Structure formats: C-alpha cells, structure tokens
Amino acid sequence: MSEPRHVACRVPETSVAPICEKGWRMAFRKLRGKFYDQRVSPDKPGGRVFPYVERIWFPYYLYTIGVNSRKGPGTIVVTVEAWSGAFAIFQLDEFLTTGAPPSGEEFSPKLTIDACEVTARENLLHTIMRQRSRSGGKPIPDQIVAREAILYPLWIYYYRRKKGVIDIKIVDGVSGQLVGHRTRSGVLEAFVAKQEAKSPAEGEGNATPSEEAPPPSS
C-alpha cells in the first residue's frame, strides 16, 4: 500500500512561538492529568525544557463531492479531521504532495473513512444552505467521486501555564492560525490514546501519578 499524501507544511518552526504568544490560553481540564506523562515531563530522562515546539502529522480524509447548479456540474473538495470529525472546505490542492512527510510523529485515524463520508456530505449541505444564493443558484451536493486519507501538519507548542500544569497551543502548519476547538480536542484525545496504548512494561518503575501531576480538575 502506498503512503498517504500529505499537505506541505508552510509555517516554519521559528514562527510558532510568536503566533502562540499572541493567542489565548487553553486549560487541559479533565485531560491534562492524563496528558502530563512521559511525553512532556521534564523530570524524565530526556525531558524537555519548556516552552518547546514539535510537529505532528494528523489524519484527515479528503473528499471530492460532485455538485450541480444552474451553471452545470462541478466538484467541491472538503476534509474531515479523523479524530473529532471537524469539517472544512479544502482549497489547498496545490500543496498536496506524495512521499513520506518530513520529520514529525504521525497519527492514525480514529474515525473510519465511511463514517466521515456522512459527515462530509451533511456539513457541505449545511454550509451551502447558510450561504446567500448566487446568480447561478446554490450548488446541490451529489455523489462523492473520490476520497482518500491524507496527513496534515500541525505544530504543538508546549508551555508551563503554572507550576505542575502543562498547557499546549496548536498551530495549523499551513495557515499559521490556531486550530479550532474540535481539532484541538481531537489532538488531545489522540495523544492520550497513544499514551494509554503503550505497553504497561514501559511504565514500570515510574513515579506514581500523584508525584507526576495534579489530579484532573472536575
């Protein structure tokens, strides 16, 4: 099986910190206790110095949907993020490339391409219905003519919000904008799932959770 295509990362690592320092802060709440683990703990061997940045490649599904209007048939390309189901119109075809993506951790999808196909069609229809009518009439979604899994670049900015609490901000590697709430939740869930899937043997000899981080807030 060939490797999935990926969207070229356009935002350099050096731009991430300035972007995040201007944004608003996000607390982990219930997830932060689980997330404070070997991935970011400075007390572990090879631990990081905060703040620091890393790039990940997150799974999305790309759908090309046929549409019909008074102007004739056409297509619209959309994406669905494969953890939270976040939807977007995709206008980055020129940045799609083949081959292995540059350095960065890759994540597998949680949601299936079939399940997200329903999300893609429904969200496109709702998006079209919210738009003002055009001279050629609103396009009506038809069949999905192509679909594929792709990888999308995200920059993770880790920093200490206060003593004992690690926080993150997530920057879109193409637009340079902070990602929306749904994608941020999807990334956090993916981090936690990957950590919990590790062999129990990897955690032997580690400090107890109470020594590593405060308990999750209610």
Image (cartoon, grey):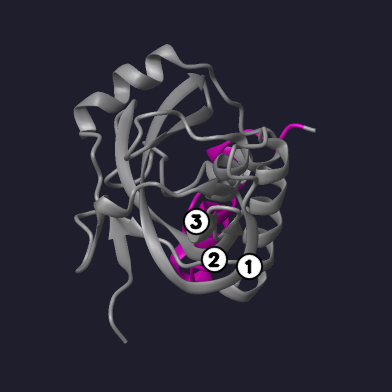
Q: Is the residue 121 above or below the residue 144 in the image?
A: above
**SS for dot 2:** strand
Q: Are marks 2 and 3 in contact (CB under 8 Å)?
A: no
Horizontal side of residue 174 vs 75, given as left or right: left
Viewer-nearest residue: 10 or 29: 10
Q: Are marks 2 and 1 in contact (CB under 8 Å)?
A: yes
Q: Is 205 part of what is drawn in magenta?
A: yes
x, y (%) of residue 40?
41, 41
**SS for dot 1:** strand
Tell me the amino acid under the disc marked 2: Gly
From which residue to which does the magenta span run? 189-217
Viewer-nearest residue: 92 or 50: 92
> Is any part of residue 204 visible from this angle?
no
- The quarter of the image holding the C terminus is top right
> What residue do we see at 49% from left, 35% from top?
179
Identify the image quadrant of residue 52: top left
Earlier sequence position, callout 2 versus callout 1: 2
Tell me the amino acid under the disc marked 1: Asp
The residue that mark 2 highlights is: 66
The residue that mark 3 highlights is: 76
Horizontal side of residue 80 vs 155, given as left or right: right
Q: Is the residue 27 above or below the residue 69 in the image?
A: above
Q: Which mark, by number, is residue 142?
A: 1
